[in-house]
Amino acid sequence: MDWSSLFSMQKKLDSYIESNHQLENKDVFHDKYLALLVELGELANETRCFKFWSNKPRSSDSVVLEEYVDGIHFILSLGIEKGLYYHSIELENTSVSETEQFNSIFELCVKFNNNPVQENYDRLFYNYLLLGQILGFTEVDIQDAYFKKNEINYERQNQGY
Ligand SMILES: O=c1ccn([C@H]2C[C@H](O)[C@@H](COP(=O)(O)O)O2)c(=O)[nH]1
């Protein structure tokens, strides 16, 4: 799957948001890093994968997918901040649980924040895509949902969000 169109869409959205908030000269890497951690928490909450104490069902696939692509936005955006790009490689089949994968991704986020180099970015991006696969989404599902959410993000900016 080719991610280049998403990288260029994200670059345009980020520039639009930054100019809308007069942030062109501010380094927002650390805000975006925290935003990604928050999105990961929100996504885990929608899946309820770790809530062994509750019988309530998880949110619908469409709600989980929308939350998932918020994370894609911030991962793309963090790469763009550092001039990094993800070259797609085929995902392995895995029997790792959702909880284990979330915990790995939190760790990979910390590593990338401490040392934002290509190798750490590739591992973070790859493992986030693997999480998508574990959650049952295809890369086409993910890209389609990204396109929709990207448009919603423009609408929100135009409505004074
Ligand atoms: O510089 C930015 C800031 C925000 N978003 C997008 C990513 C998510 O889709 C959405 C998150 O916004 P909240 O719903 O969490 O406010 O905003 C970007 O793409 N780039």
Image (cartoon, rainbow, N blue to C red):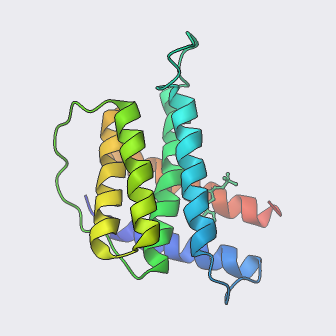
| Residue 22 percent coordinates (x, y) | 76, 83
- For residue 154, side relative to residue 6 (left or right): right
**Closest to the observer, 14 or 126:** 126
- Location of the C terminus by quadrant is bottom right
Seen from this angle, which residue lies furthest top? Answer: 55
For residue 88, what is the image quadrant? Answer: bottom left
For residue 101, what is the image quadrant? Answer: top left
| Residue 124 percent coordinates (x, y) | 35, 58
Q: Is residue 86 above or below residue 65?
A: below
Q: Is residue 119 above or below residue 58?
A: below
Seen from this angle, which residue lies furthest right? Answer: 160
| Residue 5 percent coordinates (x, y) | 38, 69
**Closest to the observer, 10 or 119:** 119
Residue drawn 44% across and 80% down? 82
Would residue 124 be visible to someone looking at this image? yes
| Residue 33 percent coordinates (x, y) | 55, 64
Q: Is residue 57 above or below residue 129?
A: above
- For residue 30, side relative to residue 50 (left or right): right
Residue drawn 61% across and 58% down? 35
